[in-house]
Image (tube, coloured by chain):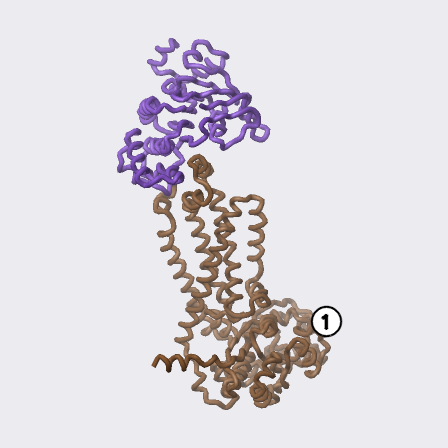
Amino acid sequence: MIALRHVTKRFGGRVALDDVSLAVEPGTTHVLLGSSGAGKSTVLRLILGLLRPDAGEVRVEPTAPMGYVVQEGALYPHLSAGRNVVLPARAANWSAERQAARLDALAALVGLEPELMARYPHQLSGGQRQRVSLMRALMLDPPVLLLDEPLGALDPITRASLQAQLGRVFGELHKAVILVTHDVREAFVFGSVITLLSHGRVVQQGTLADLAQRPADPFVTEFLSAQAPPPEMARELRL
Amino acid sequence: MALLVCAAAAPAEPPRIRVGSKSFTESYILAEMVAQIVDETGEARAERRLGLGGTGIVYGALASGDIDIYPEYTGTIAQAILKEPTLASVQAMRTRLGARGLTLGVALGFDNTYALAVRRDAAARLGLRTIGDLARHPGLRAAFDPGFLDRGDGWPGLQRQYGLRFAEVRAMEHALTYPALVSGRVDVIDVFSTDGQLARLDLALLTDDRRFFPDYSAVLLARRSLAERFPRTWAALQGRLGGRIDNATMARLNALADLERRSFAEAAATFLGRSSAETARRPARELATLTLEHVWLVAVSLTAAVLLGLPLGILAARRRRLAQAELMGVGVIQTIPALALLSFMIPLFGIGQLPALVALSLYALLPIVRTTHAAISSLDPRLVEMTTVLGLRGWRRLAWVELPLASVTIMAGIKTAAVLTVGTATLAAFIGGGGYGTLIVTGLALNDVGTILTGAIPAAVMALVIHAAFEALDRVVVPRALRAAPSASN
């Protein structure tokens, strides 16, 4: 369970988060939606413990480990894909056999050929790199998975296929997932609950249907309609 | 058989007398004479620690007990060592030096004082006979040995005494001033009255009509323990050298080495009336020995610099406040001229390889610390942050992620340090550290470009070889993917 209560975070004089509260339950995917600079990544970094709040409270149970995927993957260029994936297990002193077995299982889960595990990040496509990064985040089977624009740097076709695959994976895993995106369609694919952030403040929380049909603020409608929705989404939300 | 070998090896090493010299021809020859007399007398075996830079280094070595004896001059003793310029008599100096555990032999017979030399044609044209005559020609250009430029009984005092003014006064290594004078690039140089060059080159010595230059009688300066422990040797040195060498003889011996390319040992043997066959040099064997010494100097000091520099660089990258002070400290070491740094080591570590290794290690530190710090603190912050998320801490974060990612830059810093060290190590010869510098120092004393090159060329070759070796080492140390793909995953 992840909970933020009235969290404020400043960087110098700039307020990055202002009185933000949200809760994420196991087995649900929570989407943080907003433009760049809205404070979405700061929420993840507070949950990871990379930052401390200036006011309010951040609670994560259990505390560790957490899986973390960022845009472009942040894979270590000097390690092969497989070595990248097993890195947290090596740090946790797993046996080589246990590492290898988990590596195979994860490769199957994200649909990567086992041979690709010997390649270095620069020898993989962008989509393959993001799946390797997801494997690394899942290596220790963490109860919490945090994804910061995981598909942001991919071309539209790769992105669409990976969205579908991730949706399926999240469904199987029963984890508390927080996904940061600026893309309304991604929010539609993943989000059971959405928090729309703007300039460090929560504008509205709810399902996408809540946001579309009962906007708390003209900004909500403006944000949703700025991106052309795919037909099935428009149909479902009666936009 | 084994017993015999043991018996042969077992007797204690014969006692040694360590003979020092400065790095100019006359000092080398006199020290060779001393060494050869020591060996002949048989009370002890001579160990040559020749070419130990200037007075500061060689006297420092004597005072710290790293050498037992070396040839010195009364003027230098009064001025530079006792710092009592008015002291004139050898007896008075002997008393003063006695308080420092040192003693003086009787004067050798010649007086190697400073003198100013000009080209003979210029002397005739400008009517130059005395030093005082120079005051009428302020347009002249002078080149003086750095020692002469600095000391009170050198240029500063001379300038005041005679009211001299030149258009240009530059510092130049003594051996280089002769070619500069002959080729007309300068007009006045300082010389020693026993220089072998004086006879050959068409130079005029200017009379010191106001008797400014003090007496520079050659004497043997020794530790008192030498005279006490080896009385026969001390007596032999006095008897065979005391009062026996006049200015003409010394100039001739200097010319033998400087101009006729005889070894110092040969020149000394000529004076002592010994056959020179046993003192002939064997250059090939010498080069092999010097190469080993040089490799040793570079390898040991570089290893020490890496072992010290890597942790210091990592520490600086971790502690920002400390980094400033640390990088500044390491930088300050680098600003100390190499020769000065070497001479600072003498009071702490004596002379020989140890002080040279310490000084070279300190010198190699800056490029290693600086590149390690820069490489680690400029790593992609997202990659570093991810180590925390993945649970990598302490040495694992360093060994698994930071050092491999920084290895390309760090290796470049070590490579720079290695090549620098090969060059700087040639200065080790000035404090008896051996290596190729020995040939360079000797060559400078002889003004013999050939000898200088026999030291300089192997040093340059070694720098190239070491550079190539490090390029090869990159393939071992730097992760394959970082070599293959400069842009990596991003």
Q: Position of residue B216 (x, y in %)?
A: 65, 80
Question: Does residue B120 appear anywhere in the picture?
Answer: no
Q: Which residue is mark 1?
A: B160
Q: Quick check: A138 left or right of B376?
A: left
Q: Assign a secondary structure to mark 1.
A: helix
Q: Position of residue B37 (x, y in %)?
A: 53, 86
Q: Position of residue A99 (x, y in %)?
A: 32, 38
**Front in this rendered view, residue B31 or B460:** B31
The residue sitting at 40% across, 75% down in the picture is: B285
Locate residue A161: give its quadrant: top left
Q: Residue furthest front?
A: B3
Chain B colour in the picture: brown
Locate residue B4: give its quadrant: bottom left
Q: Quick check: A232 left or right of B340?
A: left
Which quadrant of the rendered structure holds the N terminus of chain B? bottom left
Chain A colour in the picture: purple
Locate residue A145: give its quadrant: top left
Q: Position of residue B17 (x, y in %)?
A: 54, 80
The residue sitting at 67% across, 81% down in the picture is: B94
**Front in this rendered view, residue B337 or B33:** B33
Q: Quick check: B187 left or right of A159?
A: right
Count the marks. Answer: 1
Question: On what subunit does the disc labeled 1 rest?
Answer: B
Please tell me whether residue A207 is drawn above or below residue A105 in the rendered image.
above
